[in-house]
Image (tube, grey):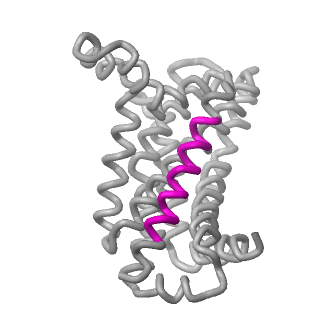
Amino acid sequence: MHAMLSVTKRELGGYFVTPVAYVFIIIFLVLAGATTFAVNLGAFWERGQADLDSFFSFHPWLYLFLIPALSMRLWAEERKGGTLELLMTLPVPTWAAVVGKYLAAWVFTGLALALTFPLWITVNQLGTPDNGAIAAAYLGSLLMAGGFLAIGSMLSATTRSQVIALVLTVVVCAALLFAGISDVAEFLDGRVPAPVVETVTRFSFLTRFTEIRRGVIDLRDVVFFFSLISLSLIANAVIVEAKKAD
């Protein structure tokens, strides 16, 4: 545990040594604000409702491109720079290195998400929103970001190229998002058995997040995200062990 926390602190501090952290945060905040207030997108003012639905509804699509850009460097950079072997020679178990690097990225993403709190304050000044639902939506957004990061970290370990890691993560995460779109379900309906269609839909990040965003925290949704994160990190550790001698 001490080794894992040491890796987390080292990685988290490393984000702020370079401009990467500040660029990511600024881009996320700008895009989150733009999608919330733009007339043709979130239309926050035009809706005239005291809620943050227009803010959270675009999070899956923001994460689809921003999270892979963050996760692509986690292991690909270590492999390309030849520092993976050095990291593995330290008295740090592989699992501790994997979890530590992942937690640093997740905490950093959580910090970027927390910096959107002025929107929460604003909506409370404008009306009487359901703050429980907003809190649930923040939790769901953080869990979804964690799922994206876990997949991105795992795929980053498979290659030395950050670009390839980025593309692979976008493709896999896009598949997990689009699986929850009604058009996909309609396309599959009649072509495959109904239980298969339902299973595909339930594996969608979009479906899970939408339910949490409504203020209903179903234990099955929480278990889904933590199970996905755990399995991805286990696979991540296995891949790192296999690749460290390359």
Measuring from the top left, give residue 209's x and y in whole percent.
Answer: 55, 31
Q: Nearer the viewer, residue 175 or 66?
A: 175
- In this orientation, which residue lies closer to the viewer: 66 or 122? 66
Where the N terminus falls, by quadrant? bottom right
Q: Is residue 110 above or below residue 227?
A: below
Q: Residue at x 49, y 26 (%)?
A: 207
Using the image, determine if residue 129 lies above or below residue 170: above
Q: Judge whether 173 appears above or below 15 on screen.
A: above
Locate residue 150, reporting x and y percent. Answer: 51, 54
- Residue 61 colored in magenta in the image: no
Q: Is residue 237 magenta?
A: yes
Task: Give the quarter of the image for residue 152.
Answer: bottom left
Q: Nearer the viewer, residue 86 or 171?
A: 86
The stretch in magenta equals 223-240
In which quadrant of the rendered view does residue 35 lie?
Answer: top left
Name the side, left or right, on which 69 lies relative to 237: left
Q: Is residue 208 above or below residue 164?
A: above
Q: Residue 191, percent across and down?
A: 22, 15
Tell me which secondary structure the magenta stretch mostly adopts: helix
Write the residue at 35% across / 46% down: 172
Labels in figure, total: 0
In the image, residue 237 lies at what x, y percent?
52, 65
Q: In this view, which residue lies farthest toward the top?
A: 190
Say whether residue 197 is left or right of residue 188.
Answer: right
Where is the C terminus found, in terms of image quarters?
A: bottom left
Please name the residue shown 43% across and 70% down the image. 73
